[in-house]
Amino acid sequence: MIDPKLIDDLAKRLAGTVPEGLRSLQQDVESNFKPVLRSMLGRLDLVTREEFDVQRAVLARTRAKLDELTARLDELESGGKAKRGKTGKKKGNKSGKRKTD
C-alpha cells in the first residue's frame, strides 16, 4: 500500500504549482488531488521497497550461481577438448564410430 504521507506531500506539491490567481482555491485543489492520486497510484502495479530489495537479492544470487555454473561448464568443456585428437574424435576410438553398448 502507498504511504498516505507520500500522497499528502505530493498533493501539497501539486497544489503549490497552482498559479497565484487561483491560490484561494489551493486548499480545494489540494483536497481534490488526494483522491485522484490515490486512484491513479492504486492502478499501478507497484511493489514496496522491501519486496524490491528481496527480489534484487534473489536476482544477485541467481546471477552468481549462473556465473559459477558457466565457469564450471567452460572448465568441463575445455577438459573434454584436451582428451580429443586432431580430428576432433576421442582418442582410442580409431574407427570414428560411436561406441554402442
Image: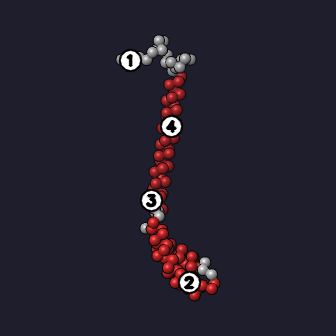
Which callout, 2 or 1, points at the residue further toward the start of the chain? Answer: 2
Badge 3 or badge 2: first in the primary sequence: 2
The answer for how far apart the CA atoms under marks 3 and 2 are is 36 Å
Q: Residue at x 46, y 72 (%)?
A: 38
**Horizontal placement of 46 versus 16: left or right?**
left
Residue behind mark 1? 100
At mark 4, the secondary structure is helix
**Residue type at numbered disc 2:** Gln
State the residue at coordinates (63%, 85%): 21
Residue type, mark 1 in image: Thr
Q: Are marks 2 and 1 in contact (CB under 8 Å)?
A: no
Q: Which residue corresponds to the image point at 56% horizontal and 83% vertical from the top-left?
A: 26
Tag 1's secondary structure? loop
Per the rendering, the mark at residue 26 is 2
Return the residue nearer the eye: 84 or 24. 24
According to the image, label 3 marks what residue?
51
Earlier along the polypeptide chain: callout 4 or callout 3?
A: 3
Q: CA distance from mark 2 to mark 1?
A: 85 Å
Residue sitting farthest toward the bottom: 24
- Image coords of residue 62 (percent x, y): 47, 46
Image height of 1 relative to 19, above or below:
above
Disc 4: which residue: 70
Residue 5 appearing in the image: no
Q: Secondary structure at mark 3?
A: helix
Q: Earlier in the sequence, mark 4 or mark 2?
A: 2
Q: CA distance from mark 4 to mark 3?
A: 28 Å
